[in-house]
Image (cartoon, grey):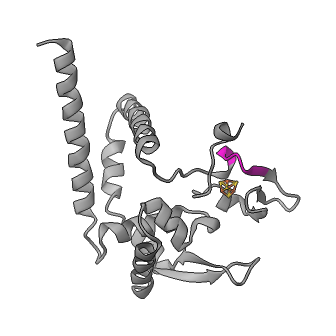
Amino acid sequence: MSTQATDNIEKEELTRLLDRIGRMARGLQYCHGLNPAQWDCLRFIGQANRFSRTPGALAAFLGTTKGTASQTLKALEKKGYLTRVADPDDKRVRHIELTNLGANLLSKDPLNCLDRAIDNLPSSVADTMAAGLAQLCNGMQSRFGGQDLGICHECGHFAGPSDTGNMICGLKSAELSCEDAKRFCVNFSPETERS
Ligand code: SF4
């Protein structure tokens, strides 16, 4: 068999494995009374900064409509996992927050078992997989679209620390706490794309 043919079989095998892991991961997320979309939402709210904890940002992240994202948020609010809190700088804006119940549920995330399986891989394998999958993900994203997520220190809009010890977002002309600046943002724009 030619090297080209062997390469193609290995690539097909990789595609099949990725699909299989994706399906298994999805199947695991029908638990604790939630479905995969609701787990995605809970995870997103748990990791996003305050500018991104909105129905619009969630919709952009999930690649869905704002209506569908709102339905998912409402279902989780009704179950007591999420709540809405007024922005300290602008009372008209309300951010979505995890409740204690939601944070507790998130600690039982069914995808934690994938983390544990990855922990058991030799670090050289995990590093190679991380680099390859990141490349694959970036390639798919540039071809088919998808929301880029990142943190302030790697963002072209980041305007440095403020006199009050917070971080400044140049895009929003607003401050974030140091803690919030380490969370994912849907307005993230890589520094390299802006230089
Ligand atoms: S600096 Fe960038 S990552 Fe940070 S809040 Fe602003 S847009 Fe988001």
User: Residue placed at 31% from the left, 62% from the top?
Assistant: 110
Q: How many marks?
A: 0
User: Residue placed at 63% from the left, 55% from the top?
Assistant: 182
- In the displayed structure, 116 sits above or below 70; it is above
- In the displayed structure, 143 sits above or below 169; it is above
- In the displayed structure, 104 sits above or below 136; it is below
Q: Nearer the viewer, residue 55 or 42?
A: 55
Tell me, yes or no, whether the highlighted magenta stretch contains residue 155.
yes
- In the displayed structure, 156 sits above or below 50; it is above
Residue 175: percent from the left, percent from the top? 77, 63
Residue lying furthest right in this view? 163
Quadrant of the image occupied by residue 62: bottom left
Quadrant of the image containing the N terminus: top left
User: Residue placed at 62% from the left, 52% from the top?
Assistant: 188
Tell me, yes or no, whether the highlighted magenta stretch contains residue 175.
no
Residue lying furthest bottom in this view? 78
Quadrant of the image containing the C terminus: top right
Q: Nearer the viewer, residue 84 or 195?
A: 195
Residue 41: percent from the left, percent from the top? 43, 68
Quadrant of the image occupied by residue 123: top left
Tell which quarter ligand 1 is in: bottom right
- Side (left or right) of 17 relative to 171: left
Residue lying furthest left in this view? 1
Residue 172: percent from the left, percent from the top? 74, 62
Q: Which residues are magenta?
A: 153-159
Quadrant of the image occupied by residue 130: top left
Residue 67: percent from the left, percent from the top? 44, 76
